[in-house]
């Protein structure tokens, strides 16, 4: 035990003496120890520089990929802006930035920071442009939803067209101001576009009648219904079930008489419906409680 204790003490003394001599030699610049210290420090600096360079190179590559993607995004934004009716030249506050990052020499940290700052400015510009385009496209979508392009009856077929025809009651030539959709009694009548119900009444000629105002002096008319599910003042969605096919009023059989009026002048509804043939079909809105109280007609 005494020998082990002595050996341990000698080891500690040797380590302490070595440490003291090494530090003193390094501070005072002793030839051998100074050289060793410089080699160790140089190796540490080289390793640190190599680590930083590898990280800077990786950052530069990622930055180049980001710039290339931003160029593609700006090109796409300029094409989409034409669909939204926006001139990209309106956004001249921040010039376009971008382009692949070409490394002819190793980039410094300051250069990377400057490139990142330019990229941030360009991203802000693209974000502003996309926000305006989103607003314009949303506005256009709302306007399209207010144009009567939805087929008002799915479970039926077109009977009489818009124009002059022989009146089935008088046998004389008369102007037919809408389209007649032949369908079974009780078939769903759908709103051709979103709007507000301005008329819900029983008319001598039209029978159970609904008129929906879509704004811009545009109104759609739905006549001869057997049952009505809306009332005056209701806000209607495109494709919503508003009534059921019937034969009320001046009618020879179950059908829907559908009209489109612009500034109170009847227009050919087929022109509007044909324009909506390529639009996505809107699902019929479901009613939770059946016919609204006070609005049911038979």
Image (spheres, rainbow, N blue to C red):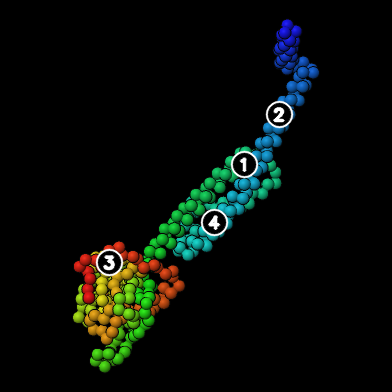
Circle 3 SS class: loop
| Disc 2: which residue | 44
User: Upstream in the sequence, badge 4 or badge 3?
Assistant: 4
Circle 4 SS class: helix
Left or right, 204 with reference to 174: left
Q: Nearer the viewer, mark 4 or mark 2?
A: 2
Q: Is residue 122 above or below residue 293?
A: above
| Count of marks, rendered view | 4
Marks 4 and 1 in Cβ contact (< 8 Å): no
Q: Report how far apart the C-alphas of labels 1 and 2 lie in the structure.
A: 25 Å
User: Upstream in the sequence, badge 3 or badge 2?
Assistant: 2
Q: Quadrant of the C terminus?
A: bottom left
| Disc 4: which residue | 74
User: Upstream in the sequence, badge 4 or badge 1?
Assistant: 4
Q: Mark 4 packing: few (<14 Cα in 10 Å), some, or many (20+)?
A: many
Q: Quadrant of the N terminus?
A: top right
| Disc 1: which residue | 111
Position in image of residue 291 (x %, y %): 26, 68
In this orientation, which residue lies closer to the viewer: 179 or 24?
A: 179
Circle 1 SS class: helix
Residue occupying image coordinates x 54% and y 59%: 76
Q: Report how far apart the C-alphas of labels 4 and 3 lie in the structure.
A: 50 Å
**Mark number for residue 290?**
3
Residue occupying image coordinates x 34% and y 80%: 183
Residue occupying image coordinates x 39% and y 67%: 283
Circle 2 SS class: helix
Q: Nearer the viewer, mark 4 or mark 1?
A: 4
Q: Is residue 276 above or below residue 100?
A: below
Marks 4 and 2 in Cβ contact (< 8 Å): no
């Amino acid at each position: 035990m005494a020998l082990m204790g002595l050996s341990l003490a000698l080891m500690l003394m040797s380590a302490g003496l070595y440490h003291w001599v090494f530090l003193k030699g390094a501070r005072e610049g002793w030839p051998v120890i100074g050289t060793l210290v410089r080699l160790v420090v140089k190796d540490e600096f080289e390793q640190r520089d190599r680590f930083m360079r590898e990280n800077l190179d990786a950052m530069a590559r990622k930055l180049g990929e980001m710039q290339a993607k931003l160029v593609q995004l700006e090109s796409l934004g300029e094409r989409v802006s034409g669909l939204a009716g926006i001139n990209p030249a309106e956004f001249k506050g921040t010039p376009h930035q971008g382009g692949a990052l070409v490394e002819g020499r190793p980039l410094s940290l300051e250069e990377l920071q400057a490139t990142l700052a330019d990229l941030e400015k360009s991203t802000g510009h693209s974000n502003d442009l996309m926000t305006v385009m989103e607003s314009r496209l949303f506005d256009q979508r709302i306007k399209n939803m207010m144009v009567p392009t939805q087929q008002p009856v799915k479970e039926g077929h077109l009977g009489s067209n818009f124009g002059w025809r022989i009146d089935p009651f008088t046998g004389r030539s008369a102007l037919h101001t809408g389209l007649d959709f032949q369908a079974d009694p009780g078939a769903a009548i759908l709103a051709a576009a979103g709007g507000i119900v301005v008329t819900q009444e029983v008319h001598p000629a039209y029978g159970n009648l609904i008129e929906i105002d879509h704004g811009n002096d545009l109104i759609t008319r739905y006549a001869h219904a057997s049952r009505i599910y809306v009332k005056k003042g209701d806000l209607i969605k495109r494709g919503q079930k508003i009534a059921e096919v019937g034969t009320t009023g001046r009618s020879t059989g179950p059908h829907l008489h559908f009209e489109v009026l612009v500034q109170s002048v009847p227009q050919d509804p087929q022109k509007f419906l044909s324009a909506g043939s390529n639009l996505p079909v809107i699902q019929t809105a479901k009613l939770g409680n059946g016919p609204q109280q006070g609005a049911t007609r038979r």
